[in-house]
Image: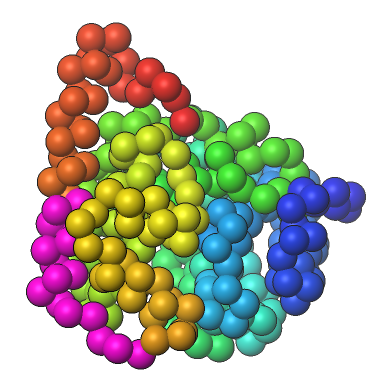
Amino acid sequence: MSINPDTRLQNLPPEIQTYSLQMVQLLHNYLQGNLLGVYIVGSAALGGFIAGRSDIDIQGVCARQLSQEEKEQITSLLAHPSLPCPTRGCEFVLYSREKVTIPSPTAGFEVNLNSGPQMCFHVTYDSKDESFHWFLLDRSIAREHGISIFGPDAHELFGVIPRTWLLNALLTSLRWHTDHDEAGYSSILNACRGWRFAEENQWSSKVDAIEWAKTRVADGELLTQALALRAGTCDKTLDQKKVKQFLNSIRERIEQVQQVDTPRTHDRGCFFHPGGL
């Protein structure tokens, strides 16, 4: 196996580099020529990774759909502590090429595995068991920002996802966070990143998204506090009423963008935003 990782990998903590390369080696030993690419996405790719606190997000692409036995074997190879994760946890998703090259508005994965020293173990093998929105957003980020550990540049495997699908996924994400994120700070961070994408068609780190959003709201204290909670430099509980008010305001802004976008994309006879991704 010849590994020629993206030079951006060198900017990540040494333990993350080692872990990522170990994962590639295990996957390649098992899948051989069926392994097409492995990519770091999420905060590590966008520039907001915090060692020990952030998850490491990794996506793989294989040449074909896998049997149940193959999926379970991959889980046994990669799950913590079989492959010890050096940060909070790893969110690993493996796709078949057909599910990512030609975009589909579904989760579309072969294996969805969450494990780590500070993460609850979770694995699913049927994409119907998970909400689509996480995976659609992550595949879009992978195409634009994925750090290749193995295989070609991410944009060669991950197709362009229509902007209308992404805006719908962002709205679904906002609803999920409103209902399930009791701490609130993750909701705030994701809402700001989604808002910036809706307005500027650009994915950014959560830190950059917060700084961008603070110049566009009347009171940035809530955003500053959310960022401090993520970094572990603050333990003050967020005001849940303010969190929900903020999330509702971002939902309304994204819906407004969606309404402006829809006639424009339909007039052009396609589902893609004119600017692309």
Number of marks in the image? 0
User: Is 240 a magenta residue?
Assistant: yes
Q: How is the image coloured?
A: rainbow
Q: Is residue 95 placed above or below 93 in the rendered structure?
A: above
* Direction from residue 177 to residue 252 in the image, left or right: left
* Direction from residue 78 to residue 10 in the image, left or right: right
Q: Outermost residue, right direction?
A: 2
Name the one closer to the observer, 101 or 50. 50
- The residue shown at (35%, 70%) is 224
Measuring from the top left, give residue 15's x and y in whole percent: 75, 76
Name the one closer to the observer, 146 or 192. 192
Can residue 259 be seen here? The reply is yes
Name the one closer to the observer, 114 or 96. 114
User: Is 91 a magenta residue?
Assistant: no
- The residue shown at (53%, 74%) is 54
Measuring from the top left, give residue 193's x and y in whole percent: 37, 52
Measuring from the top left, give residue 168's x and y in whole percent: 24, 42
- The residue shown at (53%, 72%) is 55
Measuring from the top left, give residue 245's x and y in whole percent: 11, 63
* Direction from residue 26 to residue 82 in the image, left or right: left
Q: Which residues are magenta?
A: 235-250
Name the one closer to the observer, 142 or 125. 142
Can residue 135 be seen here? The reply is no
